Image (cartoon, rainbow, N blue to C red):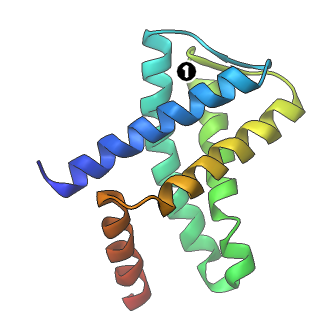
Amino acid sequence: MPKFFVGWLLGLAANAIALIVCWLLLSGFKLSFPIGFIVAVVLFGIFSAIFSWIVFRLLRGKGAAVVALTGLISTFLALLLTSVLSSGLDIDGVTTWVLATLIIWLLSVIIWFIPGPWRNERRERERARDDD
């Protein structure tokens, strides 16, 4: 199986876990199982990848502190669009929005530090970005 596909599947699994953790911890975070959840995971994964790339490109020259916000901003935007376009995810209340964004972002940071095939791919992409 190609590394990209493995990384994509692992990313979807990580997104699914992050959404379930938010659903378990936050009363205003609602998922509808099973079809709505699957659609929400796929949409969130797509939007997260797109927004991460766009926000990183926009903020890349602004300094390390601003670039660190890339993950938070892209996570929030991905949650927002997924919530709007999917009936599988509903988020109620400002506190829930903030906490869900932080939880998902934090889980993605933790997963990034776990050794595995996704780590090598990310390093290669970061090197390629630095060379651009």
SS of the residue under disc 1? loop
Of 114 and 100, the residue lying toward us: 114
Q: Amino acid at mark 1?
A: Ser
Compared to 9, does 67 lie above or below? Answer: below
Of 56 and 28, the residue lying toward us: 28
Please indicate whether residue 19 sits to the left or right of residue 117 in the image. right
Residue drawn at 22 percent across, 48 percent down:
5
Q: Residue furthest front?
A: 115
Residue drawn at 48 percent across, 31 percent down:
16
Neighbour tally class for label 1: few under 14, some 14-19, many 20 plus, Cα within 10 Å: some
Compared to 51, does 80 lie above or below? Answer: above
Q: Position of residue 123 (x, y in %)?
A: 38, 74
Residue holding disc 1: 86
Residue drawn at 52 percent across, 47 percent down:
48
Compared to 92, does 106 lie above or below? Answer: below
Tell me the quarter of the image containing the C terminus.
bottom left
